[in-house]
Image (tube, rainbow, N blue to C red):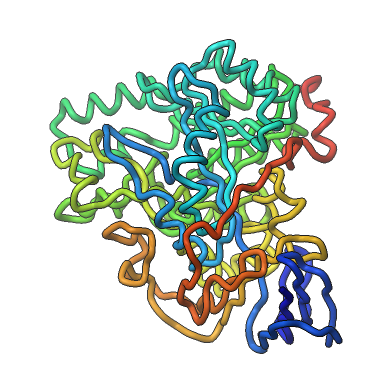
Amino acid sequence: MSLLIKNGTIVTAVDEFTGDIYIKDGKIAALGDHLSVQADDTVDASGRYVLPGGVDQHVHYTFDFKGENVRGFETSNAPVAGGTTTVVEFINQEQGKGIAETIEKFDREEFANQAMVDYSFHGVVCDPTDETFEEISTLPEKGISTVKLFMAYKGMPMHSDDESIFKALRAAKEAGVTVMVHAENADVIDYLQKEQLDRGNTEPYYHAESRPPLVELEATQRVIKLAQMADAPVYIVHVTAKEVMESIRSANEDGAPVYGETCIQYLMLDKEALAEPNFGGAKYVCSPALRTKEDQEALWEAVNKGWLNVVSTDHCGFNWAKQKHMGIEAFTDIPNGSPGVQDRLGILWTYGVNTGKISRQRLVDLYATTPAKNNGMDHCKGHIGIGYDADIVLYDPKPTSIFTNENSLHGVDFNVYEGMEQKGKVDKVFLRGKLMVDEGEFIGEMGDGKFINSKPYGLCYEGEAYDFSYKARA
């Protein structure tokens, strides 16, 4: 099958031009102005921006909290409807099983038949044995190029101490695997949570009070030093605060291969949302916690200037009416996370591009090109170029609407951006050349998505930082 997309304004991370895209057998076969080719179908993209399909490197479709599960891949039409055609899911290693064994079980039982979006996986270390660290070097053979460790969540299987993180960093470096870290000081958080509860402070707002920016800053600075000692790169996920971003920026400017992302909620929301009455603040409980408007502005500057290289969502779909209310008596029992995977492109366009905080090229880099590079998928994802998968979004900049749960496909009962204005809309989305969204409506099917092999030695290993010469200066 072949398709010709004509007369659109094609936007990449480095360029913008009016032209045509010829797609054959799911791949981009030609680019140019007024292409003279015969195609089975033709789409006129006049008046619309033609973007590569987004890559969200931070989503949760398998997470559970105290026996309650998030919405799974049966809701994976949501990213596609929002212009994201590839997601990378975090799979928590099961006790007594290997990382790859756990991932293969989920892929076989849950993803392969349900996925409406292309996908890959991060392995999450939850059983920090020598066997687990030895396995890391074999993960690229399974198409897995990243692992994650949590410094937060004291007493839970996913928590990793400094020794585990150090061992993982050393093992990962040998195989070109990127280590991602959730950086928060677990011991201090545990103490502050108990202190707040002892004072009778049980409401959602005290989630933020028990996780101040300093617990994130300390852990970030500590893991940077651990990476220096291991002589390895490290990637800090969901950065929330100005000081944390500045630590990553400083390390990188000193030559260390230290990188980080932020998420749309930290660009758009502040901790006062946690004070919403009638337990409404529970909708905004995520970790690390929401910060201040000053932090928001600092993060917008950081993503514009490349000090943080990706904007993700940390999508995590728990219902408010039932599941979030588990914490009605104590904020520590509120499941962390909020949905957002459908809204990322619209948020970045409306509040980034339209306000002048970022350019259209920078948007493409943040939501598609660099996340593909970080995760070893830039051989086929994140860019409009010959030979790449024909993951294409047509974005119409003219309509005005609002973000609302009524139009959301994420399967939960709230949207944290409810009522906010949206400029433009996703008009059409193609996944490997197949039309998945038409006039803003999802028309794809379960099983349309497929597993994407991630290759080792992603962006954290590229450039001058790869020689790790910073170690001598540390």
Furthest toward the top, the residue is 130
Question: Residue 456, position in %: x, y?
Answer: 73, 36
Along the line of sight, the residue nearer the viewer: 391 or 59: 391
Residue name at image x 26 percent, y 59 percent: 413
Residue name at image x 55 percent, y 32 percent: 123
| Residue 79, above or below 121 | below
Count of marks placed on residues? 0
Along the line of sight, the residue nearer the viewer: 425 or 22: 22
Residue name at image x 32 percent, y 41 percent: 69
- The answer to whether residue 279 is seen in the rendering is yes
- The answer to whether residue 253 is seen in the rendering is no
The answer to whether 303 appears left or right of 276 in the picture is right
Question: Residue 166, position in %: x, y?
Answer: 61, 17
Residue name at image x 75 percent, y 65 percent: 27
| Residue 252, above or below 59 | above
The answer to whether 242 appears left or right of 211 in the picture is right
| Residue 405, above or below 194 | below
The answer to whether 425 appears left or right of 47 in the picture is left
Q: Quadrant of the N terminus?
A: bottom right
Q: Quadrant of the C terminus?
A: top right
Question: Residue 465, position in %: x, y?
Answer: 80, 34
Along the line of sight, the residue nearer the viewer: 464 or 127: 127
Question: Residue 448, position in %: x, y?
Answer: 55, 60
The answer to whether 420 appears left or right of 468 in the picture is left
